[in-house]
Image (cartoon, coloured by chain):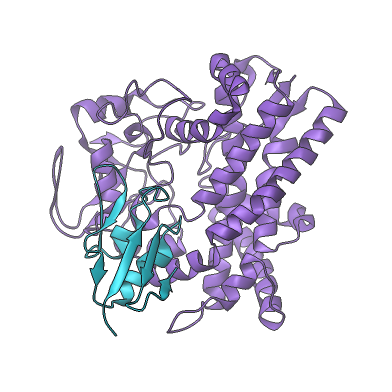
Amino acid sequence: VRTYPFGPAVGLELDPTYVHLRENEPLSRVKLPYGEEAWLVTRYDDVRTVLADPRFSRAETVTRDMPRLHPERVAGGLVDLDPPEHSRLRRLVTKAFTVRRVERLRARADEVATELLDGLVVAGPPADLLETFAVPLPGTVVCELLGIPYGDRDEFRSWVDAFVSTTTLTPEQRRGYLGRLAAYLDVLATQRREEPTDDLLGALVLARDEDARLTGEEIVNLALLMLGAGYESTATMIGNFVYTLLTRPDQWELLRARPDLVPRAVEELLRFIPSAPTAAALPRYATEDVPLSGGTVRAGAPVLTARAVANRDPRVFDDPERLDITREPTSHLAFGHGVHHCFGAQLARMDLQVALALLVDRLPSLRLAVPERELSWKSGLAVRGLVRLPVTW
Amino acid sequence: MGSWHIDLDRDVCIGSAVCGGTAPAYFRLGDDNRSRPIHDDVEPDEIVLAAAESCPTEAITVRDSDGKQLAP
């Protein structure tokens, strides 16, 4: 049994232990700081099976001693449910969070990105690209999508930090921040019940199926999920994308010369970057015996999925350790797979595409303003990311 | 009320497998990582509408026998 995580996450590197296990021990035993021992799967096919096969359950984790990094089990709302309970909520959310709603925001995202870069150009180099661009772009977009005044961001940003924090806050602090964020969202949702609006929060308030509307608590939990994922995670990923391209200047040059590659580059960067620091998030429990490539997982056993190393499985991807923005679009697992596939994936893609397209166009000579070794990385969060991204052009 | 017809646009599908997880009796992921209905015409079943309405790219359309769109 290996102690897990194998070691501290370093930058955006993938611990070599994962590759070793994928090639030699595709079903391996791990022990996390809390909870029972678990299986860890590392091959693409196995990870997909565990994520999508109905014989694996998320709901089971609620009643079991789930393997986890911190003492408290954090309630996940939508991701703690299995079909059919999950299907009801998911359907209502997707009904509100339509493709049309996201595409309508593309022009607006473009406008926001342009304004932010105008500001950067006027101020001149150097700049922290996270604070000046990567954070405000998806932040403004997700706030406009939901209908949250972006002017309130100073208030709610620290609360959102609590949402994405896994270990940086005490459980009490975390509960406190989340409670304030939930109360804030509850006020906005209540306003919309009295006075309907055309934003996503308004649509969630109105969304209903043949049985019932979403409850106030469900709406607040969904809005929390959207803010946490749509704000900090996307912001962090923009930073990670830029860092990854700037440290591989041939790929940045290629994208600059061929901006038509932006959608492919986004998919390739999603595949390539191990954004989660560990595979500890969202374990599943087998509800029946399920054969995988390394052996059979018995009913009742918890399983962790290492999506980052599966995204580099040579059985699926040619030359997988190389970042190649011309790569044919592939079904990477960055947004998950199966019923819990990220419902904001298309919004995140849109943000990431707009960000890259505008950056290569407006700041073609972009480069790091400090040596790579001087960059510092956040720790204890759900997504790896830089503390600051100092750039010049 | 007659049977329902399922259309799945494989150019729009991203292979998220949400439909197959929601309604495993009706959708399956192909070797090309694109989903397909197991049968194009099915007896009315609410779960088919749930799957269509849960698709992140709205790749699935369900119509009744009169051609009226039921989902998404």
A164 with respect to A320 (left or right): right
Residue A150 coordinates in the image, percent (x, y):
75, 55
Of A275 and A39, which appears nearest the observer? A275
Q: Is residue A377 visible?
A: no
Residue A94 coordinates in the image, percent (x, y):
48, 64
A129 with respect to A169 (left or right): right
Chain ID, purple in image = A
Q: What residue appears at the point 36 percent right and 79 percent down from the top-left corner?
A: B66
Q: What residue appears at the point 45 percent right and 22 percent down from the top-left corner?
A: A324
Residue A172 coordinates in the image, percent (x, y):
57, 58
Residue most toward the right? A122
Q: Is residue A372 visible?
A: yes
Of A249 and A158, which appears nearest the observer? A249
Q: Quadrant of residue A83?
A: bottom left
Chain ID, cyan in image = B
A187 with respect to A67 (left or right): right
